[in-house]
Amino acid sequence: MQIGKTQPANRGFPETKLQKSISLHFGKYQIKNNDEWAYRLRYPNTGISFVITDYGNKEYIGYSASIMPFIEFGMLKRKITGLNFNISLGASYFTKPYSGTPFSINNPTENNNRAISTKVTWSLKSFIYYDIVRNKRANWRVGTGFFHHSNGHTKLPNQGLNSFLVSISRQSSYNFNYKKVPEENKTPKTDFENNLQQYFTIRTGVGLNFLSEYFNDRKGVYTLAPSYGIIINKTFKIGVGLYYRFYEHYNEYIENGEDLIIEQYPHFQGNSFKYSSSFGIFISNELLLGNIGLEFDIGYNIYKPFYEVDWKLNGFYWDFYNEDGTIETRFVERDISKGYHLKHAVLVRAGIKYYLFNNNNSPKSNFFIGVNINANFGQADFTELSLGYVHRFGLKTRN
């Protein structure tokens, strides 16, 4: 069980009481797994979790049901026994998404939940657990962590839900088909040599996003990205790369001569393709778990000129005034701030891949399909489906 507090997502966010979650985890310790990734990660626990959450306001926020694959590692095993880090990435279903229309006076402040506007969202949960009571069959553990929900900018508003939680739970150390394992079968293979392999990869991606609540229809984002790096011990994939993106929404806004273009950025109309594009560099980090890859990229946008317009279009907020008995909606353009410069500069990309061939076999050529969420620092930009090719060079052992 987890309890905590939902953070206000916007001005006038509904009042909430204590957030409460019940979760059920089904996992497997990889202690008998002879693949190299299991050995390198010190035989983690992998599985799937189901979470039901009450956000403390059933009328305006409601409940969510989440399904999330997870992986759990031991932390500081040599110094602290029973300390573990768990990270989960999956999807959630919400019973009360935002239902108002853009800038609607029919959505009063007390019902102004602008965190989630779709029934289904991405979900990310990270927790640190500590076992306080351990025995052969079960552990009692306490934990603290963070729970995030976002629809990946596929519909606005999408301020996102963020919660900080503490938990107490019981972890069973047996499974439904438990049987005694002979001693000679309990020890997995451990004679792996340290190895290193260089790789080159290229991927393409098609994403969907919304520009603003004024332009709240889905348009495409197209990506091309080559990268080069190393794979350490067939498990840790690290590389650097370049990316190029083209945003359909940006191009359409420029070509249609919308207000901000005419008033502040008329030079964009001279080359709409150029000003609808962006490019930059990134560092890619990936865990290779057989056919599965867990990826996290961070980078720098060298060129993204339209983001200043994007920032302003999404920088309006609304207050409601009842002094004369009526409701008034007021819009204020957001100024360029430190927050803008940070989000304009830093790109973040996270997701999951499925590889055609098992990475434990170090295939010379491999193909993958991936689902990712892309963000401007901590704010969702677009959700993406990607396809890619990986070429590996010779595998070398190292001391």
Image: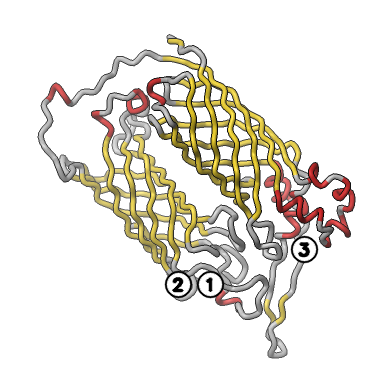
Mark 3 to mark 1 CA distance (whole Å): 24 Å
Question: Left or right: 326 with respect to 75?
Answer: right
| Residues marked 3 and 1 touching at CB (< 8 Å) | no
Q: Nearer the viewer, residue 34 or 390?
A: 390
Helix, strand or loop at label 2? It is loop
Q: Quadrant of residue 159?
A: bottom right
Residue 370 vertical placement versus 156 (above, below): above
Residue highlighted by disc 3: 333
Question: Left or right: 121 with respect to 358?
Answer: right
Q: Earlier in the sequence, mark 3 or mark 2?
A: 2
Number of the label disc, if any, that sits on residue 57: 2
Q: What amino acid is at disc 2?
A: Asn
- For residue 8, say whether it is visible: no
Number of the label disc, if any, that sits on residue 252: none
Residue at image location 12% in from the left, 30% down from the top: 181
Helix, strand or loop at label 3? It is loop
Q: What amino acid is at disc 1?
A: Pro
Residue highlighted by disc 1: 14
Q: Quadrant of the N terminus?
A: bottom left
Residue 269 drawn at (x, y percent): 86, 50
Residue 79 vertical placement versus 153 (above, below): above
Residue lying furthest bottom in this view? Answer: 325
Residue 385 drawn at (x, y percent): 54, 43
Mark 2 to mark 1 CA distance (whole Å): 8 Å
Residue 379 vertical placement versus 36 (above, below): below
Question: Left or right: 58 with respect to 391?
Answer: left
Mark 1, other Cα within 10 Å: few <14 / some 14–19 / many ≥20: many
